[in-house]
Image (cartoon, rainbow, N blue to C red):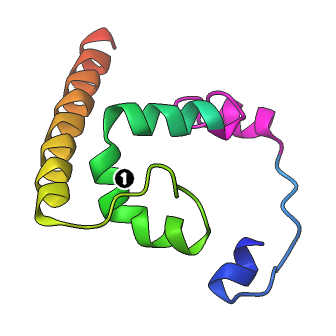
């Protein structure tokens, strides 16, 4: 399905299990379902998400209910959310380094 969307043929079947992904990168592969991740993004930085991915989401038919068209106000909110997200990541990184 993704290959069709991006115009590429599938080279090989994807046979990596969620358990393997979770074991390798547990901070990225936490739950195994998209709902919690979508809810987290929508809660933490919806303007940033829609600024970066809104066009693709609309092309795929997602987000009609929560659709946000690009505008200067959306861009300003996205920059603010990006700054907050970077601050959170920097804090988490400094905490991780302090704990090691």
In the rendered view, tell whether residue 81 sits above or below residue 55. Answer: above
Q: Position of residue 41 (x, y in %)?
A: 42, 39
Q: Return the residue nearer the eye: 29 or 2.
A: 2
Seen at 52% across and 55% down, the residue is 63
In the rendered view, tell whether residue 44 sits above or below residue 58. Answer: above
> Residue 19 in magenta?
yes
> Residue 54 in magenta?
no
**Side of 31 relative to 87 (left or right):** right
Q: Position of residue 79 (x, y in %)?
A: 14, 51
Residue extent of the magenta highlight: 17-34
Residue most extreme to the front: 65
In the rendered view, tell whether residue 36 sits above or below residue 60. Answer: above
In the rendered view, tell whether residue 68 sits above or below residue 70. Answer: above
Q: Position of residue 30 (x, y in %)?
A: 62, 28
Seen at 61% across and 70% down, the residue is 60
Seen at 20% across and 51% down, the residue is 78
Quadrant of the rendering where the N terminus is positioned: bottom right
Give the total of numbered labels: 1
Residue linked to disc 1 = 49
**Side of 23 relative to 43 (left or right):** right
Quarter where residue 4 is shown: bottom right
């Amino acid at each position: 399905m993704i290959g069709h969307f991006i115009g590429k043929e599938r080279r090989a079947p994807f046979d990596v299990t969620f358990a393997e992904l979770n074991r390798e990168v547990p901070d990225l592969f936490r739950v195994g379902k998209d709902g919690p991740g979508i809810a987290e993004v929508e809660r933490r930085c919806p303007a940033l998400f829609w600024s970066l991915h809104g066009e693709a989401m609309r092309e795929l038919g997602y987000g009609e209910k929560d659709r946000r068209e690009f505008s200067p106000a959306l861009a300003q909110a996205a920059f603010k959310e990006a700054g907050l997200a970077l601050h959170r990541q920097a804090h988490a990184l400094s905490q991780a380094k302090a704990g090691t």
